[in-house]
Structures are given as structure tokens and as C-alpha cells.
Amino acid sequence: MAVTAVLAALNLLISVQGAVVESVPRASGSLDSWLAAETPIALQGVLNNIGSGGVFTEGAVEGIVIASPSKADPNYYYTWTRDSALTLKTLVDNFIAGASDLESTIKDYINIESVLQGVSNPSGSITDGSGLGEPKFNVDGTAFTGAWGRPQRDGPALRATAMIAYANYLIDNGQTSTAKEIIWPIVQNDLAYVAQYWNQTTFDLWEETQGSSFFTTTAQHRALVEGNTLATALGESCANCVSQAPQILCFLQSYWTGSYILANFANNGRTGLDANSILGVIETFDPEASSCDDVTFQPCSERALASHKAVTDSFRSIYSLNSGIAAGSAVAVGRYPEDVYQAGNPWYLATTAAAEQLYDAIYQWNKIGFINITSISLSFFQAIYPSAATGTYAAGSSTFNALISAVKTYADGYMSVVERYTPADGTLSEQFQRDNGVPLSASALTWSYAALLTAAARRAGTVPASWGSSKANTVPTTCSASSAKGSYTSATNTAWPTAPTSSTRPSCTPPSDVSVTFQEIVTTSPGQDIYLTGNISALGSWSTTAGKAIALSAQDYRSADNLWYVALTLPSDTAFEYKFFKNESGMIIWEDDPNRVYVVPSDCGVSTACINDSWQ
Ligand SMILES: *[C@@H]1O[C@H](CO)[C@@H](O)[C@H](O)[C@H]1NC(C)=O
Ligand SMILES: *[C@@H]1O[C@H](CO)[C@@H](O)[C@H](O)[C@H]1NC(C)=O
Ligand SMILES: *[C@@H]1O[C@H](CO)[C@@H](O)[C@H](O)[C@H]1NC(C)=O
Ligand SMILES: *[C@@H]1O[C@H](CO)[C@@H](O)[C@H](O)[C@H]1NC(C)=O
Ligand SMILES: *[C@@H]1O[C@H](CO)[C@@H](O)[C@H](O)[C@H]1NC(C)=O
């Protein structure tokens, strides 16, 4: 936005102080041009709310994300673990996509969260992990001790996801040791918390309902899956991630009613139609998903689409803002139809979420190469494309193209609703009034800005990294109540390596090949041999046949040290998956899932690496 436009907007605000700034919807321009202006405002809006440099963060310590500058009616001048984590995930994804100036903010966040993990609070302390479920803290980093809906068990999972995204970036950029020494100890606490407490009741993301919450469960499943992958890449392990993730996935299935996602298991007298489920679907979005997987509730799955329709339809008749809008056109979306907070209004972040799910789905259909309309998703499609019929439509067919176009128009409709009720200066509050669209409740809400940014990015086809859903979608045959007790240690290392200045930077040629020694501790009996194979040709491309799979040596095997090993020269920076297997006179015995993952180091000066595994 030009400086003059900003000044004009400020003048408008000043001249009408106390009055309603925008009492009528603005005429919508093109959505493209509005988003081009609004996204930098939203990014600045986020940064304005992050201490200590943010203009609205008086008294906040470095890295603290305030929820909103609003200190009264309502007072949101706190830092919430959930809002901060979702916001930082957005910043990390933007950073990876090229916004390099965001890295110092990401590090500040990681530093302060490592401190907050150790702050004892009314939910508990780090000793047994219970304190990690505390929903919010004061902006100076001290515990908030007033009454509140606690614990909220989505926070640690979301924080792990934000930090894992950055850790994976570091690994991909030759900074594995930084990821391991600084980020892993923090993430490990959060993963331990999820694995230990996922099967206990929680307050939901709206802080009102105690029970079990779809959004929370999706976030927990995702975090343990990608947490275990990170652990492996760092030469660490997360056995509790491995044991608990399938059980969380099992429990996740129970939210499906047959026609929509029930947002909560709780005695709250509601229908269970709630933007909670749309936000959960966005959380579980995996751009690399190999199908429109129902089990992980992918955005393009029949379950997620049917639920999108049920949730958004629930707001059509209750807000006068939505009256006269045809079925199949986008509406203003709130949290849940029974909402009475601030008299129950549409929320910006719920409305952008309705758009974002559909942009995600479009990405998936294009990638997977077809749309499958089923009896479950049929009504979603028919509302926006009346001649839709069950069947499979291949990419490139005219029906596929027409369906994509209808979904895109529908998704853009939600963004246009947000555009219509955003004031000229671009500020995004928490809500807009259900009858006249005037912004209300907390002003400059960090999460509203972050939600606008992610929806706009998905609209532009920019997607985050995969979290591995396609290898984590096997539901155990029986669900059981479970928990794995973890151990917790305050993470104290915040000594980020400083890059040498260019004048003193030593010259460095990254290695082209690295000698990687695979060590596997595995007890074998005579006649059993150990091999490894993996997804790259140097490891045999998953073959178990002689000459392709790699044989390990038992030369140093002792009864006190059951070591098998082999050294291989591999190109640096190669990502691969692998597994060990036993060969007992031709009978192949595999290690348990998941596949192991490794990236050959590419750090300057490295010529050897050692992977220490034991039979799983
Ligand atoms: C714990 O898990 C079991 C099995 O999935 C489920 O029946 C129960 O509702 C869960 N309880 C909570 C609070 O998550
Ligand atoms: C489409 O969905 C139907 C109903 O769930 C299923 O039977 C069929 O296998 C699906 N087709 C494809 C190509 O996924
Ligand atoms: C496994 O053992 C059998 C029988 O000893 C042998 O023929 C086969 O080549 C072995 N497999 C590998 C991968 O070496
Ligand atoms: C092997 O697996 C890694 C990690 O999942 C992946 O990044 C890589 O692209 C795969 N390589 C091949 C050749 O499939
Ligand atoms: C693996 O074990 C060797 C000793 O056998 C040790 O020198 C090395 O540091 C270990 N590597 C990791 C990543 O723990």
C-alpha cells in the first residue's frame, strides 16, 4: 500500500474516532488486487504483535507473540501457546519460501518458548510435563495464575509442528547440529507431552468445552508422526511417538459421524458443527498425500468436504449478513452456530479457513490427478455444481476442469467475504458483527492475520512441507486407551551459531561424497545375517535380493556388543529411507515400521558420518 493511502486511512480513523469506521460493506475490487495489498499488511500485523520489536508489544519479552494489542473488552494481552505456534508455523513457511528476514523472529520465538516450557503454572510444571498444557502466559514470560479453561492439550503439538518445520529447514541446509542441539530438546518435551497426555480430556481451541476435540486430536497425531521422522533424521528416537501415534489416529476416526465431523466429545448440548473441524482439516493437510485420504481427514477427502458443507451451511440462516446468499455461494463463517460469545458472530479466521480447505483440496486433486465424487461428498459438489454426479473424473477431462473451477470460485467467495468486511486500513480484528459486518472484539488479532496469510498462500498454490501422512494412515484394528510416560528436561541451549561475517568467512567446499557408517545393534543367532535396503539405488531400491541389498558385517560382534555395520560412500545431501532386515537361510524378517529416514550431511568439512541404530 502506498504511504499516502496509509495516511489517508489514518486520517479517516482519526476523524471518525469513536464512531464506526466502516458501517457498510466496502465495494469489492478484484480479489487478486485486494490480496496483493492485504498480505503485506497482514504480515506486518503479525510482526507488530511479536516482542520486543513489535509496535504493539509494550512490556513483552523478545519472541513473545501477543494475541492482540487489546487490553480490555476483551483483554487478549497475553501469549497463547496455540495462537503463537500457528502464527510461527506461518512465518516459518514464509521464511522457507524466501522471506529470509523472518529468521531472527523465528529464533526469538524458539528461545522464549524454551523458557516458557519450564515456567511452573496452574496446569503444573515441566517435572512431569503437565505444565506444558498451560494455554497462556503473561507477556513478560511469567505464569498467568487466574482462573482459565486449562489444560489445553493442542498447544504442545502445534508448537512442535512449528519448530519441526524450521528444524527440517536447518537439516536441509547443512545445519543439522543446530537442529539437534537447540530445537530437538524443546520439541522432545512437547512430543513427550502429547504421547503421555493425548488420551486425557482437554479444553478445546475455543477454551470453552472440556472433553475431546477434533482439532486437538489432529494436531497431536500430526506432531507425533513428523516428530518421529525428525528424531530419526537427527539420529535420535521417539519410541513414544511410534507407540502412540497409531492410537491417536484410531481415536481420530471416532469423530466421524457418518455425515460430518463431530467437533467435540463433550457434554455441551451442541450439534458439534464447528469451524474447529475445518481448522483441524487444514492442520492435517499434507500436500504429498497420495490420496484424498479419509483416515487422516485430508482436505479433499469425502469426509472433510461433507463436513465443510455441514459447518458452513450451519451459518447461512443465523447471520443476517448471510441472508439472500444462494446455497452454493460463500457465506460469513463463525465458530459454531450456538456461539454466544460477544453475541455470536462470524470470525475472520473461520471464514479464511473455509477458503483454505478448498484451496488445499484443489492442490490435492491436481496432484493426485482425479476427483472422486462419492455419495458422501455428492451434496458438497452439487451445491456448487448442480449437475455433479458420483464418479471419478480424471484431470484434463472437461468435468474435472469444471469442478475445479467451481470449487475455486466458491473458495474465492469466502476470501471475498473477508475482503468485504475488512476496513480500508486492512486491520483484521477477531470478529465482524453478524448483522452489519462491523469489525468487533479484539483488534489486530495475530491469528486473524496469520490465517489470512496461509489462505492467501494456498490460493497462490504455495504449500508447506509434507508431514508424512501417507505412511501414517493405517488404523489399528482396535482402539485402546493408552499413554506412554515421558521424561522432560528444561531446554536451555539457545546459543545459535553466528554466521561469520563475509570478510572472515573461511572458504569452504561442501563435500560431494560422505562415508556413512551404518551401525545396527541387533542380537542374532548363527545362520542369521543382517542386511539393509532403502529407497535409493545405492541401497538397493528396497530389494531384498543378493547383490542389491547391502550386507552388514559381524566382524566386531561380541556377546556384550551385538554390532553389525557397513560403511558406504554416498553423495552428500541425499535424503533416503531405509530399513534393516534379517536373512535367516532365505527367510526375510523385517524391522518394524516406520521406515528410517536419513539425510547424508553436507556440512563443510564433513567426510564421514555414523548412524547408530538398534533393531526396531
Ligand atoms: C482414550 O482413548 C479411548 C480409545 O480410543 C477412547 O475411547 C477414549 O474416549 C479416549 N479418551 C480421551 C479423553 O481421549
Ligand atoms: C471413489 O469412491 C468410491 C466410494 O468411496 C470408491 O469405491 C472408489 O474406489 C473410489 N475410486 C477411486 C478411483 O478412488
Ligand atoms: C539370504 O539367504 C539365502 C540363503 O542362505 C541366500 O540365497 C540369499 O542370497 C540371501 N539374501 C541376500 C540378500 O543375500
Ligand atoms: C527417498 O526417500 C526420501 C525421504 O523420504 C525422499 O526425500 C527421496 O526423494 C526418496 N528418493 C527416492 C529416489 O525415492
Ligand atoms: C555413534 O557411535 C559412535 C561410536 O561407535 C560415536 O563415536 C558417534 O558419536 C555416535 N554417533 C551418534 C550420531 O550418536
Image (cartoon, grey):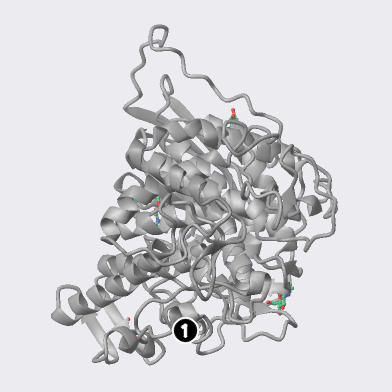
Residue 606, x across and y down, in percent:
43, 23
Q: Specify the quadrant that holds the C terminus.
A: bottom right
Q: What residue appears at the point 46 percent right and 73 percent down from the top-left corner?
A: 332
Residue 290 appears in the rendering: no
* Left or right: 128 as drawn, with respect to 532: right
Element carrying mark 1: loop
Q: What residue appears at the point 46 percent right and 14 percent down from the top-left corner?
A: 500
- Count up the numbered dots: 1
Residue 460 appears in the rendering: yes
Q: Which residue lies under the disc numbered 1?
A: 316
Residue 485, x across and y down, in percent:
77, 57
Give the class, few, some or many, for how many residues have Cα within 10 Å of label 1's Cα (few <14, many ≥20).
many
Residue 268, x across and y down, in percent:
73, 82
Q: What residue appears at the point 64 percent right and 74 percent down from the top-left corner?
A: 343
Asked if 337 appears above or below 163 in the picture, the reply is below
Q: What residue appears at the point 71 percent right and 41 percent down from the top-left corner?
A: 139
Identify the amino acid type marked 1: Arg
